[in-house]
């Protein structure tokens, strides 16, 4: 019984380690392509935290990766914004306001 | 002395002339006639009678000279009596030499009345083992001088004996020639019979060779068909063997299964002209049945088809039928074997047809065996499947039994646990319950206070001053006059269902991010009209409070929300 439990845990750790690669790829700063408005910066940190910065104001959130590469942002008030990851980009689905594309900024 | 020499010379001359006369004559009658004519003169007889007979059969010839025709004819009629009187059969059975000449005295002869009375000389002689002769001469010319009953002189007697020896020799030669001729004829006849027998034996030999060939082929067929398991393979092998055994160039064998609506067909030496189809095969089998003379379909019937060329014409046969055998395995399975012309062009004999019929009977046995084997195989496969299903069922039942045992044990443990806990619960007091409840409440308060997303103990909208409201009519005027922005504070699902045309969705849950994205550039002096709320949730007031906290100067809450707006007929979407 213990041996089986140990094997299951080891397998789960291996799966978590395997899933860590794509999450690391998402970490970084993203900039929006808003021509008529002031630029917005989206920051995803490796500890699961992140922030949206427009001008001098900043809105913190937490983020996670779910199945099929879907990225979910959790606001402090309990709201949820889903995003779809692409090649070097992140597309946020803003409720009632359409999609907003953020491109990863060069380091 | 001189006279003696003259007589001897005369006797020798007579003997020479007689020998010359008899030489070259091959007919016994002619010999007897010539001898009688030649002998009467030197002996001095005026009449003569000569008989040549076979005493065993009482047959022969009677010749006479010097007798009246009536007496000569009567004498010929008395030949059997003459044979009985003068040629006793027992005397001829080896008692006397074949050339024995007997001088018979008339008073001693039993047939004295059979011959003319004046015959002075009576001689019997044996020609061979089966022929006897009689010579009677008289009256003699010398008897007139010496009186009746005078005996022949010594010289004359010697001459007569010599003449008889010549006669016997000539008759023996003639009879021998006659026997040789008869033997030659008999030999020719026997030779012809032998030739016919030889030809017949050759035909029989060919038939036997053919039969041996057929039996060898049938024997090989039996050895090969014993290993065949499918009907089609049996038909192919059978047809090939029959064609080879009976030297036939083309043929077919067809098996029709009316129950299964199927046809098995084997064709050799000719193309398939569509007989593998059920309808054409049915027609051929029906014509074969009617032409075979059968009145009912009995199991294991094998009948030759009468006049197959005419009766099976128009049945789609790819060759002209020379021989056909109808057969029936049972009422549903029937068939026909059709053979074309032999390679030599000869028709099959009755024995061949009978053997072919017997082989078709053997074929029925093999076909029936193959069909039974197929049935048994299908039954075995079905049985195997059922066994497998039964095994799976037994396995499932065993597993279910194990599961039931496991569940029963688990249930027993649960019952034991509940029994134990029940016993323990009886020791539980209200004080314990109160302590646990207070501890839980303290832990909950502490967690709520420590959590950044904690729920305030007193709802915020009760502590803050109420937001300024506006009616739908004035909100519409404010929108048109000063460009007020309408903000829908409801969740996105409600916003998507219906909203004020041009309104922006801004919920409390996403306020921080949506405000930065959509309202950070809005001037603080722009009027903002908020709507959306129900009895339990005041999203509009929450959003209004947040906007006022961000120092927007004119934040108004629409009275009665979207309902009042829509009721006045102001534009909504979608």
Image (tube, coloured by chain):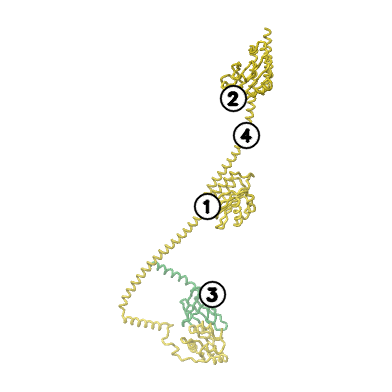
The chain holding disc 4 is: B
Residue farthest to the left, as pictured = B427
The answer as to whether the residues below labels 3 and 2 share one chain is: no
User: How much space separates mark 3 and mark 4, taking CA atoms?
Assistant: 113 Å
Quarter of the image for the N terminus of chain B: give it. top right
Q: Earlier in the sequence, mark 2 or mark 4?
A: 2
Question: Which picture quadrant has residue B396?
Answer: bottom left
The chain holding disc 3 is: A
Mark 3: secondary structure: strand
Quarter of the image for the C terminus of chain B: give it. bottom right
Residue B185 location (% of width, % of height): 64, 29
The residue pinned by badge 3 equals A86
The chain holding disc 2 is: B
Q: Are marks 3 and 4 in contact (CB under 8 Å)?
A: no
Characterize the local packing of mark 3: few (<14), some (14-19) or many (20 or more) Cα atoms within 10 angstroms.
Answer: few
Q: Are marks 3 and 2 in contact (CB under 8 Å)?
A: no
The number of discs equals: 4
Q: Tell me if I can see residue B555 in this picture.
A: no
Task: Using the image, tell me which numbered label, if any, was put on residue B368.
Answer: 1
Q: Earlier in the sequence, mark 1 or mark 2?
A: 2
The residue pinned by badge 4 equals B195
Chain letter matching colour yellow: B
User: How much space separates mark 1 and mark 2, taking CA atoms?
Assistant: 73 Å
Task: Using the image, tell me which numbered label, if any, was put on residue B56.
Answer: 2
Characterize the local packing of mark 4: few (<14), some (14-19) or many (20 or more) Cα atoms within 10 angstroms.
Answer: few
User: How much space separates mark 3 and mark 1, taking CA atoms?
Assistant: 74 Å
Chain A display color = green
Q: Tell me if I can see residue B6 in this picture.
A: yes
Q: Nearer the viewer, mark 3 or mark 1?
A: 1
């Amino acid at each position: 019984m213990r041996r089986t439990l140990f094997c299951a845990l080891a397998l789960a750790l291996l799966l978590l380690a395997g899933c860590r690669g794509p999450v690391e790829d998402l970490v970084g700063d993203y900039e929006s392509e808003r021509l008529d408005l002031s630029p917005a910066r989206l920051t995803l940190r490796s500890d699961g935290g992140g922030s949206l910065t427009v001008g001098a104001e900043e809105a913190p959130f937490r983020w996670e990766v779910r199945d099929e590469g879907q990225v979910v942002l959790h606001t402090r008030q309990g709201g949820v914004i889903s995003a779809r990851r692409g090649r070097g980009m992140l597309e946020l689905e803003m409720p009632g306001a359409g999609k907003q594309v953020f491109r990863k900024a060069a380091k | 002395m001189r006279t003696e020499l003259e007589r001897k010379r005369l006797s020798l001359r007579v003997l020479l002339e007689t020998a010359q006369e008899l030489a070259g004559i091959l007919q016994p009658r002619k010999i007897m006639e010539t001898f009688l004519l030649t002998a009467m003169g030197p002996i001095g007889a005026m009449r003569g009678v000569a008989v040549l007979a076979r005493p065993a059969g009482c047959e022969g010839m009677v010749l006479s000279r010097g007798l009246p025709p009536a007496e000569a004819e009567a004498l010929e009629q008395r030949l059997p009596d003459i044979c009985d009187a003068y040629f006793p059969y027992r005397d001829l059975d080896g008692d006397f030499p074949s050339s024995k000449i007997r001088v018979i005295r008339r008073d001693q002869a039993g047939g004295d009345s059979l011959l003319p009375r004046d015959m002075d000389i009576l001689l019997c002689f044996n020609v061979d083992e089966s022929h006897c002769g009689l010579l009677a001469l008289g009256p003699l010319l010398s008897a007139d001088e010496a009186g009746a009953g005078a005996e022949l002189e010594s010289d004359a007697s010697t001459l007569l004996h010599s003449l008889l020896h010549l006669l016997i020799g000539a008759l023996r030669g003639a009879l021998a020639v006659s026997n040789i001729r008869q033997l030659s004829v008999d030999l020719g006849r026997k030779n012809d019979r032998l030739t016919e027998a030889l030809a017949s034996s050759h035909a029989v030999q060919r038939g036997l060779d053919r039969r041996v060939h057929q039996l060898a082929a049938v024997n090989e067929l039996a050895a090969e068909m014993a290993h065949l398991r499918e009907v089609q393979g049996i038909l192919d092998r059978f047809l090939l063997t029959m064609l080879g055994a009976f030297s036939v160039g083309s043929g077919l064998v067809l098996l029709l299964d009316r129950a299964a609506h199927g046809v098995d067909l084997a064709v050799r030496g000719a193309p398939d002209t569509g007989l593998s189809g059920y309808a054409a095969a049915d027609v051929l089998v029906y014509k074969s049945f009617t032409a075979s003379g059968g009145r009912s379909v009995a199991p294991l019937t094998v009948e030759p088809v009468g006049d197959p060329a005419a009766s099976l014409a128009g049945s789609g046969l790819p060759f002209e039928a020379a021989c056909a055998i109808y057969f029936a395995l049972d009422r549903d399975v029937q068939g026909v074997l059709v053979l074309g012309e032999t390679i030599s062009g000869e028709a099959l004999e009755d024995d061949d047809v009978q053997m072919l019929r017997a082989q078709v009977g053997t074929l029925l046995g093999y076909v029936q065996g193959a069909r039974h084997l197929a049935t048994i195989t299908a039954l075995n496969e079905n049985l195997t499947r059922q066994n497998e299903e039964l095994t799976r069922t037994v396995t499932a039942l065993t597993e279910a039994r194990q599961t039931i045992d496991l569940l029963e044990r688990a249930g027993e443990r649960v019952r034991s646990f509940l029994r134990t806990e029940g016993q323990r619960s009886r020791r539980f007091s209200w004080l314990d319950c109160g302590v646990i409840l207070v501890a839980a409440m303290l832990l909950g308060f502490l967690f709520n206070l420590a959590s950044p997303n904690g729920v305030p103990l007193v709802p915020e909208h009760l502590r803050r001053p109420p937001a300024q409201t506006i009616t739908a009519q004035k909100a519409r005027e404010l929108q048109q006059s000063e460009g007020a922005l309408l903000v829908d504070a409801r969740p996105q699902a409600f916003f998507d269902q219906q909203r004020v045309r041009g309104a922006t969705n801004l919920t409390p849950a996403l306020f921080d991010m949506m405000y930065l994205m959509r309202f950070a550039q809005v001037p603080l002096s722009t009027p903002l009209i908020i709507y959306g709320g129900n009895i339990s949730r005041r999203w509009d007031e929450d959003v209004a409070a947040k906007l006022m906290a961000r120092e927007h100067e004119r934040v108004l809450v629409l009275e009665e929300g979207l309902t009042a707006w829509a009721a006045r007929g102001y534009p909504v979407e979608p």
